[in-house]
Amino acid sequence: MRSPPLRSPRWPEAEEEVQEVPPPPSTALSLLFLLNVALLVAWQLLLAAILAHRHDWPRNAAGAALGWAAWGLTYGWWYHHPWSPGVPGLGLTTP
């Protein structure tokens, strides 16, 4: 006996109404996004330059370890509790 074909719950059935595709972002929003990306790249380059020329290796290693530990505590422990604000991107603007 053959089983019926599997259907993904994401795909609408033929008789269901298909949602419209949202319009593309405005030019101002696209420029703001590109400016944020440029600032992030500049910040990363400045950080790399500071780490390469400013401090000695033990300070760089200690700073990297502290940063990694803070990231691990934030995303691995703190965001999983009900009293935390939640993971970024899942805030009030999410429908």
Image (spheres, grey):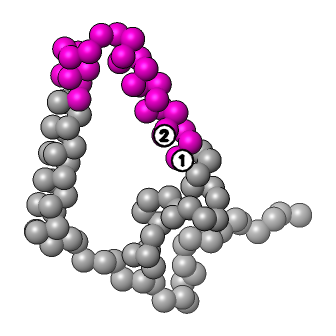
Secondary structure under badge 1?
A: helix
Measuring from the top left, give residue 89's x and y in whole percent. 42, 62
Measuring from the top left, give residue 91's x and y in whole percent. 45, 70
Q: Name the main secondary structure of what is drawn in magenta.
A: helix
52 with respect to 4 (left or right): left
Q: Are marks 2 and 1 in contact (CB under 8 Å)?
A: yes
Q: Which residue is mark 1?
A: 75
The quadrant where residue 84 appears: bottom right
Between residue 14 and residue 2, name the one nearer to us: 14
Task: Using the image, determine if residue 62 lies above or below residue 25.
Answer: above
Q: Residue at x 43, y 20 (%)?
A: 62
Q: Which residues are magenta?
A: 47-75
22 with respect to 70 (left or right): left
Residue neighbourhood size for the residue with mark 2, other residues' Cα within 10 Å, grouped as few (<14), some (14–19), many (≥20): few
Residue 76 highlighted magenta (yes or no): no
Q: Which residue is mark 2?
A: 71
Q: Residue at x 52, y 47 (%)?
A: 74
Q: Quadrant of the C terminus?
A: bottom left
